[in-house]
């Protein structure tokens, strides 16, 4: 195959034609079925450490081997014990978790082989390879939408050529974490409510709904804390221990060490007599008051103070220990029908926000910079300096990465994140209303995205997709209802609209759609 440097040489049309499109035939599909191999070395100490592998983004279906043994992903959801789990679910935006077992250093094994086979999406569609027409431009022949949780625009759009492999492969972070013993913590949750102004040491209970503007305002917030624990030992006997937590001011440049946590903590606590007695369990750490906090605002209205929560589980005999942390901001988000505009109105800390923004698809067609914090910072600062305070992440693209949302938190950008449907391919203009074909895999991707992003103050609201219509058919009713249920269950703080637009002349409901018309055209 011809050689070119993907980091420096953007392929021109002649080079692109030398590569097969994944839809050409079975040989082309095999060509883009990929193996990734590396070695894993455990930390060099005398503790019994257990390794945990997390694949944060794979398109479309990974199969993992560790020292030649195929591993099954484990679930972090209690509800999956009695229902569908993510063991065999495909999708580009679903995290997969694997237990690598105890380190083998005591067996004189210095390293282990990690091999990941990535299978392409089941439906890739036929792309538009020549001049686009209205029938084959937006998503090629539209069949890519059958795959569900995928980047539809890789089949081609009116602004982009097709991506030959549909971005098959590992596109987001690969993480290995070592824990002391058999307990692993996941997805700590910070839910903020009952924010009141502090005044001379007292709480101004009249300021619950609309909070005052100004970076000098100090508030007290009720913080609801929860965390998920999974147990991986050979025995299912209950494990007794304790949870400790600390909340400190956050800095992306210098996070506090464990030794610094207590001295700099704005709030802390320990919950004793905790028992972990099932394979996975959500644990409610309780509600606490966070004093002397500052409000997070979009950059057009104020500053963006952030806080760091760190949670530690220790077993009573000190043989198990696991840590997890997250950053968060103190703010409220809500929506209403504007009294004057009769349209969707977003409110931050009780104040209506004039949303001046733009559309975002991805930083790069081939996702080469999906973990580049600096690139995200540069691009979001360009948008902020242009006067934008909001970004809509389009449903034909991707769910953005941890680095993107961390930068959006720090820059003060409000994000409208759509899920992976478009009117172009999901029934309205072409395709079928009941796509994707696998509703269960699709909704499991949605659920995981909600849990992954819920602590980011920049995330303002979710959307079902791009230009979906009519609302009783698109998104499919079962998917739309499940999205709403998962937002209530795993988030509980953000608005959701089923579609970006409806149709002029229809009864327009701003709580279901953002607008009755798709811009000044069409």
Image (tube, rainbow, N blue to C red):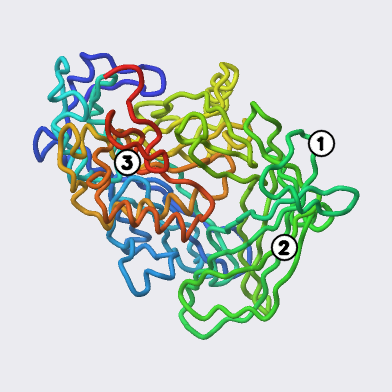
For residue 420, the mark is 3
Q: In this view, does 376 lie to the left or right of 100?
A: right
* Residue that numbered label 2 is attached to: 288
Residue drawn at 18 percent across, 48 percent down: 434
Q: Residues within 10 Å of mark 3 (few under 14, many from 20)?
A: many
**Camera-nearest residue between 46 and 519:** 519
Dot 2 lies on which element?
strand
Quadrant of residue 324 within the rendered picture: bottom right
Q: Position of residue 156 (x, y in %)?
A: 23, 26
Going from N to C along the chain, the mark reached first, 1 or 3, is 1
Q: Residues within 10 Å of mark 2 (few under 14, many from 20)?
A: some
* Residue furthest to the left: 25
Q: Give above or below for 183 relative to 292.
A: below
Q: Give above or below for 360 relative to 483.
A: above
Q: In which quarter of the image is the C terminus?
A: top left
Q: Position of residue 129 (x, y in %)?
A: 15, 21
Mark 2 near mark 1, Cβ–Cβ under 8 Å? Answer: no
| Residue 170 in view of the camera | no
For residue 216, the mark is 1
């Amino acid at each position: 195959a011809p050689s070119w440097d993907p980091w420096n040489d953007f392929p021109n049309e002649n080079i692109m034609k030398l590569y097969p499109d994944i839809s050409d035939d079975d040989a082309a599909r095999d060509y883009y079925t990929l193996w990734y191999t590396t070695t894993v070395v455990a930390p060099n100490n005398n503790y019994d450490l257990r390794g945990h592998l997390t694949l944060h983004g794979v398109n479309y279906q990974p199969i993992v081997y560790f020292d030649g043994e195929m591993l099954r992903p484990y679930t972090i959801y209690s509800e999956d014990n009695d229902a569908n789990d993510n063991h065999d679910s495909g999708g580009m935006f679903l995290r997969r978790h694997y237990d690598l077992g105890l380190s083998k250093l005591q067996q004189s094994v210095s390293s282990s082989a990690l091999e990941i086979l990535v299978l392409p999406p089941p439906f890739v569609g036929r792309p538009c390879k020549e001049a686009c027409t209205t029938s084959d431009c937006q998503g090629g022949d539209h069949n890519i939408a059958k795959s569900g949780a995928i980047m539809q625009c890789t089949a081609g759009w009116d602004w982009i050529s097709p991506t030959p492999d549909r971005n098959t492969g590992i596109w987001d972070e690969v993480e290995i974490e070592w824990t002391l013993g058999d307990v692993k913590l996941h997805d700590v949750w910070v839910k903020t409510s009952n924010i009141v102004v502090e005044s001379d040491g007292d709480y101004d209970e009249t300021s619950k709904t609309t909070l005052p503007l100004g970076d000098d305002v100090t508030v007290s917030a009720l913080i609801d804390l929860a965390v998920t624990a999974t147990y991986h030992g050979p025995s299912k006997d209950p494990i007794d221990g304790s949870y400790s937590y600390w909340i400190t001011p956050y800095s992306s440049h210098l996070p506090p060490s464990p030794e610094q946590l207590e001295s700099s903590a704005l709030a802390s606590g320990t919950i004793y007599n905790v028992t972990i007695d099932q394979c996975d369990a959500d644990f409610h750490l309780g509600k606490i008051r966070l004093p002397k906090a500052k409000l997070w605002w979009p950059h057009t209205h104020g500053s963006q103070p952030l806080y760091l929560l760190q949670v530690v589980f220790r077993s009573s005999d000190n043989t198990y220990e696991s840590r997890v942390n997250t950053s968060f901001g103190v703010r409220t988000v809500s929506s209403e029908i504007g009294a004057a505009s009769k349209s969707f109105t977003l409110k931050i800390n009780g104040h209506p926000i004039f949303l001046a923004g733009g559309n975002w698809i991805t930083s790069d067609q081939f996702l080469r910079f999906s973990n580049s914090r600096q690139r995200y910072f540069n691009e979001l600062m360009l948008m902020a300096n242009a006067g934008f305070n909001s970004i809509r992440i389009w449903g034909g693209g991707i769910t953005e990465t941890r680095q993107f949302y961390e930068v959006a938190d720090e820059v003060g950008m409000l994000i409208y994140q759509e899920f992976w449907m478009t009117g172009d391919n999901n029934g309205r203009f072409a395709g079928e209303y009941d796509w994707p074909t696998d509703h269960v895999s699709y909704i499991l991707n949605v659920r995981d995205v909600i849990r992954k992003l819920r602590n980011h103050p920049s995330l303002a609201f979710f959307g079902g997709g791009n230009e979906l219509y009519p609302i009783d058919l698109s998104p499919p009713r079962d998917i739309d209802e499940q999205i709403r249920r998962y937002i209530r269950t795993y988030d509980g703080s953000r608005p959701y609209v089923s579609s970006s637009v409806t149709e002029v002349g229809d009864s327009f409901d701003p709580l279901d759609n953002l607008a009755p018309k798709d811009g000044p055209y069409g």
